[in-house]
Amino acid sequence: MDVPVDLAAKLALLDEPYEPGIVGYYNENKLVVVKVLGEFVWHAHEDTDDFFLVLEGRLTIQLRDREVVLEAGQLFVVPRGVEHRPKAEVETHVLLIEPRGTVNGGGAGGRLTAREREI
């Protein structure tokens, strides 16, 4: 990354919810933006924590024992191995930081699993 990244412009390139786009790299991690609307799938990442930073909107991260609600400007880290499901009732924009090669959905599969792509 040798120029500033306009996250709003990158998010505008995403057509559908849960179709993440890589906007840069930080050490061995990818910086990913995604639109969230509706419910994702229950999943866990066995090898990594899951970092969520809400840029716009309101995100609920469902855990098996509670829900964590994030407003714009708030972040939460789901510890590795903890089953969770993100959801949003209004379109919500999120920045994720995760190791390169991490599959969205933690390998749970299904129609919402997306390939890695740079935008």
Image: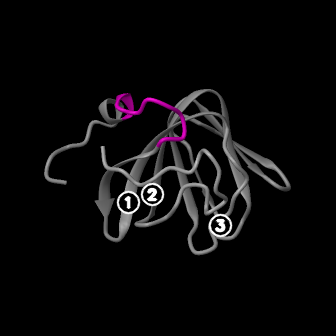
Q: Quadrant location of residue 17?
A: top right
Residue 15 counted in the magenta span: yes
Residue at the image position 43 percent from the left and 66 percent from the top: 101
Mark 2 packing: few (<14 Cα in 10 Å), some, or many (20+)? many
Badge 3: how crowded within 10 Å, few (<14), some, or many (20+)? some
Furthest toward the bottom, the residue is 47
Separation of residues labelled 1 and 3 (CA atoms): 18 Å
User: Which residue is the extreme one toward the top?
Assistant: 90
Residue 90 at x, y = what percent? 62, 24
**Residue 69 lies in magenta, yes or no?**
no
Between the C-alphas of marks 2 and 1, the distance is 6 Å
Magenta residues: mostly which secondary structure?
loop
Q: Secondary structure at mark 3?
A: loop
Q: Quadrant of residue 104?
A: bottom right
Would you place residue 70 above or below residue 50 in this image? above
Residue type indicated by callout 1: Lys
* Magenta-drawn segment: 11-19
Position in image of residue 55 (x %, y %): 47, 36
Q: Secondary structure at mark 2?
A: strand
Marks 1 and 2: in contact by CB < 8 Å? yes
| Residue 22 image point, x, y percent | 36, 50
Q: Which residue is mark 1?
A: 30
Q: Which mark is residue 79?
A: 3
Give yes or no for contact between labels 1 and 3 (Cβ–Cβ under 8 Å).
no
- The residue pinned by badge 2 equals 97
In front here: 98 or 43? 43
- Tell me whether circle 2 and circle 3 mark residues in contact (CB < 8 Å): no
Quarter of the image that includes the N terminus: bottom left
Q: CA distance from mark 2 to mark 3?
A: 13 Å
Query: From this viewpoint, which residue is outermost toward the left?
Result: 2
Considering depth in this image, is 113 or 6 the residue closer to the camera?
113
